[in-house]
Amino acid sequence: MPTPRVARVAVDVPLAHLDRLFDYEIPDALVEDAVVGARVKVPFSGQIRDGWLLELAESSEVANLARLRKVVSPEPLATPRVAGLIRAVADHYAGSWSDVARLAIPPRHAATEKAPQREWPEPKPLDAASVLPAYPEGSSLLEALAEGRSPKVLWQAAAVHGGPGDLIGGVIEAVDATLRSGRSAVVILPTARDLTAALARFRAVFGHGAVGSLASENGRSARYRAYLAASRGEARIILGTRSAVFAPVPDLGLIVIVDDGNDQHEELRAPHPHARSVAILRASREDAGLLIAGHGRSTDAQALVERGWLRELALSPGDARRVSTPVRAVVEQDRQRDPTAARLRIPSVAFRFLRDHLARGPVLVHVPMVGYSGSLSCARCGNQARCSRCAGPMRERTKGAPECALCGHRPARWSCAHCHTSQLRTPLPGAARTAEELARAFPGVLAVNSSADRIRDEVPDESAIVVATPGAEPEAAGGYAGVLILDAEVALGRADLRAAEEAVRRWSNAAALARNPHDGGSVLIVGPSAHPAVQAMVRADLAGFAARELADRADAGLAPAVKLARIVGEGDAVRDFLDNDDWEGIEILGPTEVGSDRWAALLRTPVDRAKDLTRRVKSAAAIRSARKERGLLSITVDPESLEDR
């Protein structure tokens, strides 16, 4: 059989019209190292470029081929399986292969690659499962995974500390069942903080050396070492953040996405793939199981349930109310009945909730923002306080001393331009301010602020007020005696189409830190008690809420009920892009000005025509690239939000 002498290379260039393979002649000196999946260097357009050797051939239709310049590493990382997934993700998001490859395969670390790899021991089996069997068909899920089948499941864990609410415990059970079938598992966490906590539990169960961690926060060498272990078939359990969804473990049996509604699962770099979508594509291509696990549920996951692609694993609302921490809601109208509560900006009911639960242990106070406040407003007319010099928003950096957030001006006496009063108010206290005020209201009680750069991992199991922002909640060993959620109307009033969905997700995660009802745990939400999102928490009916949100999105023509592509950039660039296709059968909304010389257009089509939309978006991008059209432009397919992040 003739030796292949042609290398087909994906060259690392960002231009959309060059998103294809290029043929190169393999010199005699490189034949042995030029294997499929190797990193190479090739001449391209007068420069030496990086690339990946994806195919070998005996001949080429191109005459006078340029020669492969160098094999950087013969390590076969971009195997056909990996390259195929990268191609599928690039096509799904109308991006290029090289853009996705940079996200999927970590940068090379030569010393790590050449060093002897440590041995990866076989994971220790779990003694028994107790979390998932508490759910209808939970045992059936574990049996299916252990038998080598590939179920696709949405698991909504109960919002309670421990027991059926042990989210990571249930994930460990699913991974253990997968390992029993001789297959591997990949678990994706939204943040490095979540990853650290999950790693400790996984390693305690399966053995410290049996679990790999794949995240940029680990450092270049450690990240590359874990990726090599997966690629070489040595590691069977990989935990990581969003890019770890590409981890090339051997014989993949299960992919787990934890808290899929968290925006940290969406990549900020082009083409902005979401870990959930990559997991869906990969599970379909490799016939692997998929578990989307969380205390809440996203509308995207709900859409897959309603289409029959995901099976639902959840308690009924009635059963959920029996095992979950009970949730009550109170409006803010009665705060004036108690002077102390009024000074704290909370109703007297919430003040009593704090006092009563502090007698039994730590209480979590959940607030939607960090610091002291977002901005100041006039105490009389309510208009936002503006700087007299530059018209920037005024903020309170230190108590009683307003300053401009833009120019830093600190007026001796501020005056409202509308009603000329000098009185200011803070419409929303942040975590730091709330912690200070609660510490003064409850002298002698430990007050902890966990937010921004002061995030705590855990708090002692004793009387304490723990003020935290979403995602920064510390763990309490025995669970919180109570969880008080403040300023619910602020979370629901965010200028985001997913505001209500995101609020429920955050509240569910906070509620899951509270003790079970038998131990006296409870949750109190301060906000509009009649709002559907608040009622969903009170009734423990998050499935019904997600279904309602999805129906509203279908009526409004928003994702995931439809396929969307968002084009944002300079005005001329957006218009030129739209001129590169006739867009027949595709609805165009805009372009609309969204900032200083920033314009946005939405392309919309039914879900059953999704592939046609992405194909045409990619074609229009290739035409723009080939014509060298000017102006900055970004393309986002399936945007999680219509706001700039």
Image (cartoon, grey):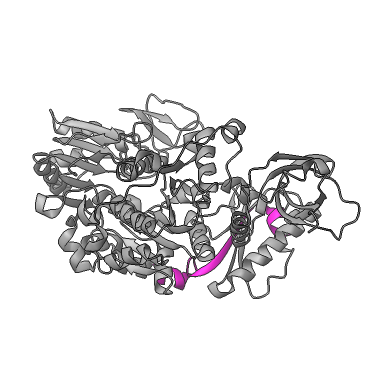
Q: Where does the image place residue 281, in percent across and percent down from the top left?
A: 53, 62
Position above or below: 377 against 603: above
Q: Where does the image place residue 498, in percent across and percent down from the top left?
A: 42, 58
Q: Residue furthest top?
A: 412
Q: Is residue 368 left or right of residue 69?
A: left
Position above or below: 624 against 225: below
> How many numbered discs sit on the rendered protein?
0
Task: Looking at the picture, tell me which residue is in the foreground, 337 or 283.
Answer: 283
Task: Looking at the picture, tell me which residue is in the foreground, 203 or 22.
Answer: 203
Inspect the magenta stretch and tell me whether residue 202 lies in it. Answer: no
Q: Residue furthest front?
A: 1
Examine the rendering and report whether any part of residue 645 can be seen.
no
Quarter residue 536 falls in: bottom left
Q: Where does the image place residue 4, in percent across and percent down from the top left?
A: 78, 54
Q: Residue furthest right?
A: 64
Examine the rendering and report whether any part of residue 491 can be seen.
yes
Task: Looking at the picture, tell me which residue is in the foreground, 390 or 601.
Answer: 601
Highlighted range, magenta: 550-576
Position above or below: 582 against 80: below
Position above or below: 517 against 201: below
Quarter residue 449 falls in: top left
| Position of the N terminus by quadrant | bottom right
Q: Is residue 522 left or right of residue 506?
A: left
Q: Residue at x 48, y 66 (%)?
A: 560
Q: Where does the image place residue 158, in percent across and percent down from the top left?
A: 25, 58
Quarter residue 566 falls in: bottom right
